[in-house]
Image (spheres, grey):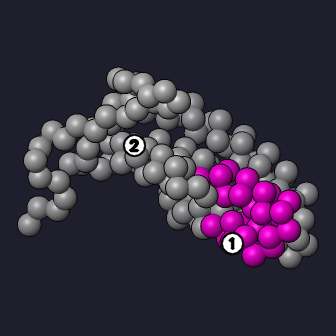
Amino acid sequence: MKQEQVQDFTRRISQSNKSALVVIIYDIIFAYIKDAEDGLACDDYEGFKKALAKAGKGVDELIHSLDFHYEISKDLYALYVFVKETLAKAVIKKRTDELADVKEVLMNLYTAFVEAAKQDHSNPLMQNTQQVYAGMTYGKNNLTETFQEPETSRGFFA
């Protein structure tokens, strides 16, 4: 994953609530799957394997966030286990054919979580972070983001 993507995901995580965080995890998984496909296209099997392992860790995070008090969690768990197994098959076979099934399953879930996140107006999970404003100024080839600090001190309070 490129450094720009990491910075973007970090910024998004710092500003997100619970529902938006799930959407971001899906975005991270998709980014790693793309990295895996690109790696195998360049005959970089180690990069392919590492990218799929990181995608698998994203799926693990989705599994750990399930609340089994709700019936739908059991269905989501089964889908996530299918995705994990399919990622493992792709690594063993050294092929990206299986990744099409993974992307299809995850994309269907992703669209549902995006819609749910639109309806969630709760506060961000992280407190005491920088506020980010995008689009206030523009560079020649890029969008400039401005960070504003509401307080002079950030971090943990003892």
Please state which amino acid type lies under the numbered disc 1. Answer: Lys
Quick check: 128 above or below 62? above
**Magenta residue span:** 28-54
Foreground of the two, 5 or 80: 5
Residue situated furthest front in the rendering: 140
Asked if disc 1 and disc 2 are in contact, CB closer than 8 Å, the reply is no
Across and down, in percent, residue 1 comes to: 61, 58
Disc number placed over residue 15 in the picture, else none:
none
Find numbered disc 1 in the image and state the secondary structure of the residue it sits on.
Answer: helix
x 31%, y 34%: residue = 146
**Magenta span main SS:** helix
Find numbered disc 2 in the image and state the secondary structure of the residue it sits on.
Answer: loop
Q: Is residue 88 left or right of residue 150?
A: right
Q: Is residue 46 left or right of residue 96?
A: left
Label 1 or label 2, whichever comes before in sequence order: 2
Please state which amino acid type lies under the numbered disc 2. Answer: Ser
Q: Which residue is mark 2?
A: 16
Instruction: Check residue 51 for magenta coloring.
Output: yes
Across and down, in percent, residue 116 comes to: 53, 34
x 25%, y 47%: residue = 129
x 17%, y 62%: residue = 156
The crowding category of the residue bearing disc 1, from other C-alpha atoms within 10 Å (few below 14, some 14 to 19, many at least 20), is some
Q: Is residue 131 visible?
A: yes
x 36%, y 42%: residue = 15
Disc number placed over residue 50 in the picture, else none:
1
